[in-house]
Each structure stands twice: as structure tokens, then as C-alpha cells.
Amino acid sequence: MVDIRKRNGSKGITYQVRYPSKASKSGYAYKTFLTLKEAREFRESGETKKTGPARGDGIVTVADGIEKWLEVCEKEGRDGRDPVTDFTLKGYQYRARIINSFSWEKSLQELTAPDIVEFRSWLLREYPRSMAHFVLSSFHSMILEMVFRGVLLHDVAARVSIRERSRYEEPVAIPSEKEVMDLLAAADRLANSKNRQIQRTWERYRPILYLAADSGMRPQEYLAVADSAVRDNGAEVTRAVERSGDKLSVPKTAAGRRFVDLSPDVYRMVRHYADHHSAENDYDLIFPTSTGSWQMPENWRNRGFSAACFEAGLITKEKVKGEIVEKPKYVPYHLRHFYASVLIANRKDPKTIQTLMGHEDIKTTLNVYGHLLKRVPAKTEPTSGMLATLHAH
């Protein structure tokens, strides 16, 4: 491992680079610089690799490193985490193909910061910013894995990154309180429709919509919610429908496992449906399909949520191939943003919001909702369900 140490001696403050060396009895060599910039440039120049190459384990090229990284993700889990899901692995494999398609002219151990910067420039030229961000993030994850395993001496990509969102992009769209209430009122009307088929459909969709607005769960979480998880006036989030839709899985991160309080009316509504209307199934699902399986998030979006948007008048008009087309103003995930906005309006502190949203890293909370947090001073109080909080005001 190569590191930089700050020293305060007779010459004032200097910066010492320590790096492995076979020529030294201690196993390390040292070089001192007057500025941190010079020390970093030396560390990243590749000079530290000439006197003592790291343990290779047969990993020479970037493609070798990527192959090892994918294997770790699939079979071991990175940095002590669980192995990734099949769906996540497919995404990583796609990013790996992009990384390998770049013309890497050096071996993995010869790479320097300017090489990573060139790779970043290529990504931004060839791919949308969001995809470039994810690919570079996966590349950096591979580099860190190689450092941990002794294949590389230091993180050569440490200071090279891509912002996922441009500073000029609009903040996330958040439905207003009135719009959410209109959406729930639309669900009430549809559940009481004179059309028997619509009524039966919304007998199930209505509690799903109320649960989504009241809990801030991700769609793949509330569609997989278990009967046994709805208790103690709340819901335990323990699993999710994988994005591919082919199986139930645990939440993507450990932080996704959480307990969410529900408003009394919503809790009673969900429990009533579970106790009196939920079909028998092998997965302890509250909202199974007629065949006893879980609902696909895309089906819920198209058949349930979008229908409620149209009923509530929450639509936008877009020009598609020369024709004006009406589309829902929101998608199910927007109710999650609404939930976060009410937490912020009620002055919950960022750490509480992170926990209730199931974010693994508070940076995610701050990146998505930071513009709202800046407007409201924080306080910490227990939450008792989103809709109950609104009704209290």
C-alpha cells in the first residue's frame, strides 16, 4: 500500500510518500516532498511501482481485474457484503463490457490518474452522463477490490469521478399534498365504481396506493410486503420484488430493512384487506395476483397507478410523432419523494430521513433532497404515519 504522511520537522511541513520496495530491509522506501501536490503526483506517476510490484495473482490487465471483480460480486460479496442479486449482476456485467471496450494501452498496475481521466473523457463522449457515472463507479469499485487484495498498491482512481446529475438539472418532481389527496380520492371512487370489474380491481389497488403514499416504500417493496410484516401499527420492510420481476429478494442493501409506522386508517385498511380479501398464496403476500404470485411493478404502474392519475386529472400532454398524447403526470416512485418531502416539512433530521427512506448512504439522501433540507431547520420526533401527520395539520 502506498500512503502519504504529513511531517513537521526542522524544514517545516513536508509530505513523505511511503511505498513498497524489495531493495529495503523494511520492505518500504520513502521520498519526501515540500507540497502535498508533488507527493500525490509522485504516488500516481507509476514510479512507486517500479521498485516493488504488488501481488499479482495472475491479474495483469484491466479485463483480468474486471473478471475478478465480477466473480467477487457474484460469489463472495464485496467488502463483507452479501453477494449481489442476479439482476444487479447483469447490470454489472453490462458495465464491464463497456469498460473492456475502451482501448486500455497499459497493464492494470501501470495505470496512473491521467489514464483514468482519459477513460472518464471517453465515457462522457460515448455515453449519457448517468451511464458514464455508473460505469466509472463500477470501475472504481474494481480498483478498490484490487487494492484490498494486494494486486494494486493504491487507489489510482481516487479523485476521478462523474457527477450523476448535472447542477443544471431540475430537482426531483414532488407531488403536492393536494395532488396526493386527489390521487387517493380517485382510488376511493374507483373502488366504489358501479362497474363490478373496476370495483374488484380497486378493492386491491386502493390499499396499495394508500400504503405507497403513507410509507415511502419503493414500489418493489410494498408489492412484496408480507402479511406477517404488517403489525404493531406499521410495516416491516424485509424483501422486494427484483427489478427483473422473476423472484422475491431481500432489499438491495441492509439499510433497506426497516420498520415504517403507518397512519391508523391506512394500517386498518391494509390489515382489513389482508384478513378478508387477500388470496391464498405460498409467499405470505398481502397483495398477490389471482395466481398467487407477486405483482410486477410495471403492471402496477400501468394498470393501477396510471389509472388513478387519469381519474384524478393528473396528466401531462406530450407531442409524440406529431400527435398530442396524454400521459400520467407521475409514476409510483414519486409518492416516495412526496413522503420524503413531508418528513422534511415536519423538520425531521437528515439521519432520521435516511433511516426511514432506507438509504444506505446519507449522501443519497442529501443529493436527492438537499435542496429541500436547506429550507427547513431540523428537529427529531417519532413519526406515526405520513397521512396522519398531514391530517393533524
Image (tube, grey):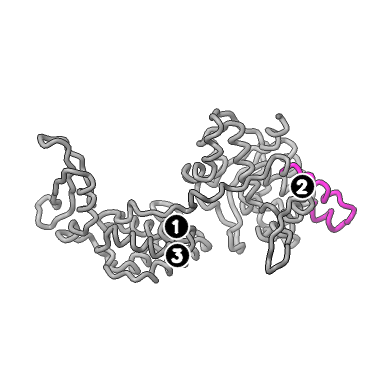
User: Is 322 located above or below residue 302 in the figure?
Assistant: below
- Residue 45 is left or right of residue 370, and the answer is left
Q: Going from the N terminus, do you reach mark 3 or mark 1 first?
A: 3
Whole-angstrom CA distance, mark 2 to mark 1, is: 42 Å
Whole-angstrom CA distance, mark 3 to mark 2, is: 42 Å
Residue that label 3 marks:
95
Mark 2 lies on a secondary structure that is: helix
Give, as a three-letter code, the residue at label 1: His
The dot on residue 133 is 1
Q: Write down the region rendered in magenta.
A: 180-202
* Circles 3 and 2 in contact, beta carbons < 8 Å: no
Residue nearest the observer in this picture, 145 or 362: 362
- Residue 381 is left or right of residue 37, and the answer is right
Identify the main secondary structure in magenta: helix
- Residue 215 is left or right of residue 25, and the answer is right
* Residue drawn where x is 73% and y is 53% of the image: 315
Give, as a three-letter code, the residue at label 2: Tyr
Q: Is residue 271 magenta?
A: no
Q: Can you tell which quarter of the image residue 262 is in?
A: top right
Give, as a three-letter code, the residue at label 3: Arg
Question: Can you give x and y, in whole percent of width and height, for residue 144 in the image?
Answer: 34, 55
Residue that label 2 marks:
273
Q: Is residue 194 magenta?
A: yes
Question: Can you give x and y, in whole percent of width and height, for residue 103 in the image?
Answer: 34, 71
- Residue 6 is left or right of residue 121, and the answer is left
Which quarter of the image is occupied by the C terminus? Answer: top right
